[in-house]
Amino acid sequence: MALGEFDLIRSFFDRPGLRSHLTDVVGIGDDCALLSLQAGQQLAQSLDTLVEGVHFPKSCDPYLLGYRALAVNLSDLAAMGAKPHSFTLGLTMPEANNTWLQSFSDGLAELASMHQIGLIGGDTTLGPLTLSIQVQGTLPKASALRRKGAKVGDLIYVSGSLGDAAGALPDVLKGKTPKSADTPEQRHLLERYYRPTPRIPLGQWLLANGATAALDISDGLLGDLGHILKASQVGAELNTASVPVSKELENWLGPEQARELALTGGDDYELCFTWPAKTPLQLPDRLLADSPVTCVGRITSATGLVDAETAQPLSPKAYQHF
C-alpha cells in the first residue's frame, strides 16, 4: 500500500537525526514552522534547488544525494559565518519509493546530526525528481561576512584544495560512486564531489576574528573571486601556482589539467576569503587540521583579476545556470 503524504513525512523525515534539538522551535506537524531568535541575533537563509539530470545524474545513490543536498546549503551559511539553525525540504518525486526515501533521509540525517541542524518543515509532491532545501542560520546582527568587504591590500585565502569535484564529474555522470571507484584517486575525487565539507567552524572563526569578505566556491575560483571583486569594487592579483591542488587530482589528470580545474571547476564548496595583510592569520590548530588554508593572492586598487606572475588578465570563468 502506497504511503500518503503525512505518513511519508512521519516515516522518513520526522525521525532522530532530523528533529531539531532546539526547544524553542515548532517544526514538522503544523502549518508553519515557528522560530525564536535571541536578542541581537539575525537570521541568515539560503535555498538551493537540485534537479535530476541537471544537477545530479539519474539513478544517483539517494544516500549520497541527501548528504550532498544539505552540504551545499550549509556551505552558504559557512561563507557568512552563521551558525546552523534549521532547514526545510521541498521534495518532488515521481513515486513514493520506501527504499529510496529511507536511504535519502539517512544521508540527510548523517550531516544534519553532525551540525545539530533540524528539519522543521517543507512539502512533498508528485513530479520529476527535484530537491529544494532552505537552510537557516543565526549570527549577531550586522556582522555577517559578505562579498563586499574586501579592502585594497587584503590577502586572499582559500580553504582545502580545489578542482577535486570537477575532476570527478565525468565519472559522476557515468554513475560512478565512491564505492564503485576503481582506484584510490578516483575514490577520493568522488568522495569530494558527493560529500563536500561545509566549512562551518572556519566561517564562524573568520567572522569572529576579522576576515573582511568571504564566499563559498561553488562555480569555480576565478568566477567566484570575481564576485568579491565586483561587490567590493576592487581588483586582485592571483598567484595561480599557489592555488592548492590535491595529489589525487594531479595523479588522476596530470598537473596542467588539475591546475586548470582548480581555477575554473565548481562544486568544491571551499571558502574563499580576504584577510587584512597587517594582521597575521593564526588559525587554531583544531581548525587547521580540518580546514587548511592557503594564501593565493592579494586585493589591488586596479579593477580586474590578473595573474600575479605575468600580469596577464584572468578570465573570470564560472558555471552559468542559464
Image (tube, rainbow, N blue to C red):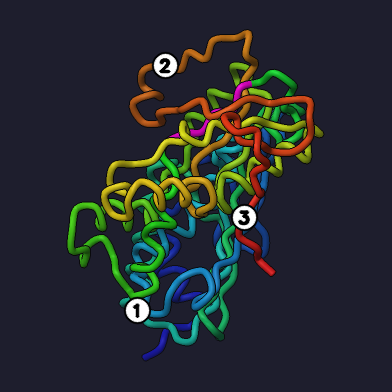
Q: Which residues are magenta?
A: 155-160
Dot 3: few (<14), some (14–19), or many (≥20) neighbours within 10 Å?
A: many
Quadrant in the rendering for residue 288: top left
Q: Amino acid at mark 1?
A: Asn
On residue 284, the disc is 2
Is 121 contained in the magenta span? no
Cα distance between the residues tagged 3 and 1 = 38 Å
Question: Would you say 21 lies left or right of 172 here?
Answer: right
Query: Do the numbered discs 2 and 1 sit on residues whose CB atoms are within 8 Å?
Result: no
Residue identifier under label 3? 318
On residue 98, the disc is 1
Whichever of labels 3 and 1 marks the residue nearer the N terminus, that label is 1
User: Which is more foreground, mark 2 or mark 3?
Assistant: 3
Q: Position of residue 217 (x, y in %)?
A: 55, 45
Is 158 contained in the magenta span? yes
Q: Position of residue 133 (x, y in %)?
A: 57, 60
Cα distance between the residues tagged 2 and 1 = 44 Å
Q: Position of residue 117 (x, y in %)?
A: 49, 45
Q: Position of residue 302 (x, y in %)?
A: 78, 29
**Residue in the foreground of this view, choosing between 87 and 14:** 87
Residue in view at x 62 percent, y 39 percent: 215
